[in-house]
Amino acid sequence: METVIFQPANDFELSLVKKFIEKTNIKSRVISDEDKEGFVLAKMMQEVDYSETIDTTDFIKGLNH
């Protein structure tokens, strides 16, 4: 099943969403800001194009200049 993520703009909206979820018995979970950052980082890592690489020695030389 797909997952829906809500990001309420304020405490009132959060309260409304929580009440709706409780009344409808929808399975839910609250995640922290740190967890959200982890999801975004994982998504970015999945989208990286690794088809072009550079020699490690050349990369280190470039850092030293």
Image (cartoon, rainbow, N blue to C red):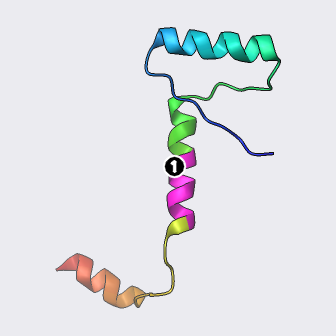
Q: Is residue 42 magenta?
A: yes
Q: Quadrant of residue 17?
A: top right
Q: Position of residue 9 (x, y in %)?
A: 43, 21
Is 1 one of the magenta-colored residues? no
Q: Which stretch did the figure color magenta? A: 39-46
Amino acid beneath label 1:
Val
The quadrant the C terminus occupies is bottom left
At horizontal 51% and vertical 52% (from top left) the residue drawn is 41
Q: Quadrant of residue 58?
A: bottom left
Which residue is disc 1 drawn over? 40
Relative depth, front residue between 52 and 19: 19
Left/right of residue 24 with respect to residue 34 in the rendered view: right
Above-or-below relation of 35 to 58: above
Q: Position of residue 47 (x, y in %)?
A: 52, 67
- For the N terminus, the quadrant is top right
Residue at 27 percent across and 85 percent down: it is: 61
